[in-house]
Every structure is written in C-alpha cells, then in structure tokens.
Image (cartoon, rainbow, N blue to C red):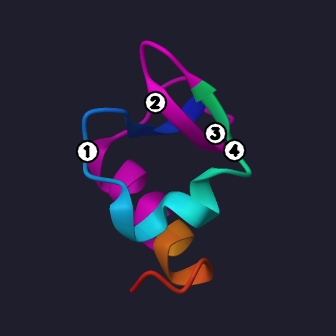
Amino acid sequence: MGGFLDHEQDTTLVQKILNQYDYHEKYGYKIFTIDADDLSYEVGSKLLEEWLKTNNVI
C-alpha cells in the first residue's frame, strides 16, 4: 500500500522534495510505502507527520 500526498493539495512548499517521488495521475505523489492489510487514520497521520519532519517541512 502506498502513502500518497493528494494531487489536489497545495504542494508549493514541498514541490522541490516531491520532484524525487513518483507521481500517479489518480492519487498524487507516492511518498512512502506501507506494509499493512488495514491502516487506521491515526497510523496514516503519524506516518505523514514523520515524513514531514524527516523532510524538514514541520
């Protein structure tokens, strides 16, 4: 399962970072991969937060 940054979001602040990730027309940028059968909102949010911190966005 992929973690995607929605293609409808304003990506201006992270565009330079996103250029290194694959872009999928329907989903947006695939920023990480998740090995899980079921993913809760809380776990997904935590993974996004960690990605943002790793890339010095927050």
Determine whether label 3 and label 2 are within 8 Å by CB: no
Q: Is residue 38 left or right of residue 51?
A: left
Inspect the image, locate mark 3, and give the three-letter code of the amino acid beneath it.
Answer: Ile
**Mark positioned earlier in the residue sequence (2 or 4):** 4
> Is any atom of residue 53 visible in this view?
yes
**Along the line of sight, the residue nearer the viewer: 38 or 3:** 3
In the image, what residue occupies the spot 40% across and 54% down?
Answer: 43
Label 4 secondary element = loop
The dot on residue 34 is 3
Determine whether label 2 and label 1 are within 8 Å by CB: yes
Place residue 45 in its image quadrant.
bottom left
Label 3 secondary element = loop
Q: Position of residue 39 (x, y in %)?
A: 43, 35
Label 2 secondary element = strand
**Mark positioned earlier in the residue sequence (2 or 1):** 1
Residue named by callout 4 = 21
Q: Nearer the viewer, mark 3 or mark 2?
A: 2
Residue named by callout 1 = 9
Real-space CA distance between mark 4 and mark 3, rounded to the nearest whole angstrom: 15 Å
Residue named by callout 2 = 28
Place residue 48 in its image quadrant.
bottom left
**Mark positioned earlier in the residue sequence (3 or 2):** 2
